[in-house]
Image (cartoon, grey):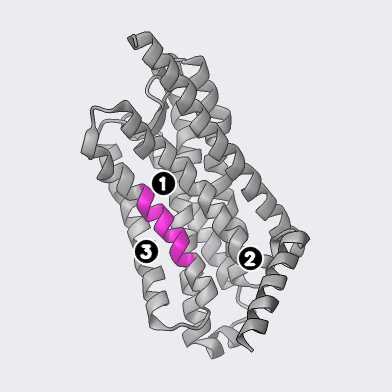
Amino acid sequence: MTEMEISASFLLLSNILQFVPALIGALINSYLFYKFFKKGVRSGFYKLCLLKTIPNFLVCAGFLFWAVPLGFLQIRSERIPRIMNVLVAQVCGSFSYVLGPLLLTSMALNRFVALYFPVFKSSNSKLPVTSIWITVCIITAACYAVAGLPEDCGYMFLPEEMLWISEEGKCSEIEYDILLYFVFVAGISNTDAKLRRRTYIKRLSQCFIQDSLHSIDSINTTYTYKLDESSLWFQFICFSLSFVVMHMLDGFVMFFFHTAVQPMWLRKQSSVKIMVSAARIT
């Protein structure tokens, strides 16, 4: 095969591989947001789950309306205004990527307080702790995204290589280190909550799985890609495909753990399976 044929096949397959999970992820997270919002806020944890669908949707939308069109058209990065490329990437990438782990940390703290300080939570029910923390998370993520707008600080998409990567510069290196710390803190908080007690295992398991997805993606973009830096396909998998697939799966995790937002036919099937299992046990 010639270089032109290889490029054409890579272009077609890489765009399809981005488009499919991006479309599914956008649909599942839009559905979850609608169902969570329609049912109303039942608890702080429920509100955090609703908010978690937003960064997931933004990432998937970034692929659908930015990465995939630019990839198909093969508009080279130097022809795209830097501020536009960086702005889209900072909103869909940096803002969403930071907001996700912060919300996961909030979920873990919410479960921790419910487990160990139920009296405190009850006596302070009038204080909108969850809403305050959500505001702090959004402001922090927004500040992180704005910090990447200056030259050599940002995050952008390269259509010619189908990669989401940081610009080369000391500023972008510092930003990336901060991002890793956000994911690491989320992992510590969720693991700690899971190991301390088995009560609320369902919600803690949800937090743990969601954080594991973010951790895997961070490992891919920090270490795994170095295993074969000469392979464009391998770099694409580590930097782009991993990015969109993890946020799609994040939506499915919430869909799986929250039966109240599942379609009625699926809930009926789950109920039948539970009844059959119970009958076998008795």
Instruction: Check disc 2 and give the amino acid type.
Output: His
Residue 206 drawn above or below residue 219: below
Q: Which of the two discs, 3 and 2, sits closer to the camera?
A: 2
Magenta residues (range): 207-217
Image quadrant where residue 58 sits: top right
Mark 1 vs 3: CB contact within 8 A: no
Q: Between 223 and 33, which is closer to the camera in this rendering? A: 223
Residue hosting label 1: 144
Q: Is residue 166 visible?
A: no
**Tag 2 residue:** 258
Q: Callout 2: 10 Å neighbours few (<14), some, many (20+)?
A: some
Amino acid type at image mark 1: Tyr
Of the residues under marks 1 and 2, which one precedes in the sequence? Answer: 1
Instruction: Provide the secondary structure element on which disc 2 rests.
Output: loop
| Magenta run includes residue 157 | no
The image position of residue 209, as x and y in percent, is 45, 62
Query: Dot 3 lies on which element?
Result: helix
